[in-house]
Structures are given as C-alpha cells and as structure tokens.
Image: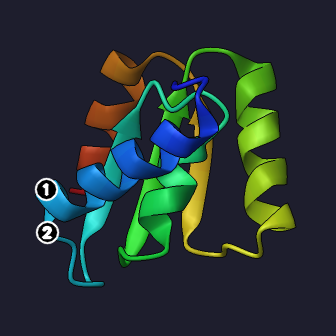
Amino acid sequence: YQVNPVQTVELYRKAVEYAGLTGSETVIDAYCGIGTISLFLARQAGRVYGVEIVPEAIEDARRNAALNEIGNAEFEAGPAEVVIPRWRQEGIV
C-alpha cells in the first residue's frame, strides 16, 4: 500500500502495464487488503479474486467494489495458502 496518492496511481499503472492485461485474464491478488490493487486491476482484467486473512479488510474490499460499481471482483477472507489451492481445485487459475 502506498500512502502517497499520486504515486499510488503511478505504481498501479505500472503493475497493469507489467501484467500486460488484455481483458480476458483471471488475476489473483494474495493478501489484497481492502482491495485497492485488485479493483484497479479489475478494470482491465476479465476476473479478479482477492484473498486476505483479515475479515474486516475483506468487508471493506467488497464495499469498495460496490461503491466503484466493479462486478468482476470477488473477495474471500482466509489464509492465502489455504484459499488459493481451493480456488485452483474449483478451476480458478
């Protein structure tokens, strides 16, 4: 998380650039916090999944997605090392 708002946008743009998103990708954001990076990426990815161990942060991430009218992002509370393998078993890769 970047506390400088001007640099936040620049850092997130760089992340999107390096990811080379085309709009069809599935992105997993481990330890997503309140979903700021997840939601930024969701604007250019097909689907985004965020996982975070802090349940309150996941509630905030869901609220942020709703406030920003982003419907292609899902968030789940739990340890990434447990949730991500389960997602893989469910076909999320």
Q: Quick check: 71 left or right of 69? A: left
Mark identifier at residue 47: none
Q: Quick check: 61 left or right of 87? A: right
Q: Quick check: 37 left or right of 21? A: right
Amino acid type at circle 1 is Tyr
Mark identifier at residue 18: 1
The residue depicted at 56 percent of the width and 62 percent of the height is 73
The residue depicted at 82 percent of the width and 65 percent of the height is 66
Q: Quick check: 53 left or right of 82? A: right
Residue lying at the far front in this picture: please name it.
Answer: 6
| Colour setup of the view | rainbow
Cβ atoms under marks 1 and 2 closer than 8 Å: yes
What x and y, as percent, mark residue 9? 49, 51
What x and y, as percent, mark residue 44? 38, 76
User: How many C-alpha atoms fall within 10 Å of the one at disc 1: few (<14), some, or many (≥20)?
Assistant: few
The residue carrying mark 2 is 20
Residue 27 shows in this picture? yes
Element marked by disc 1: helix
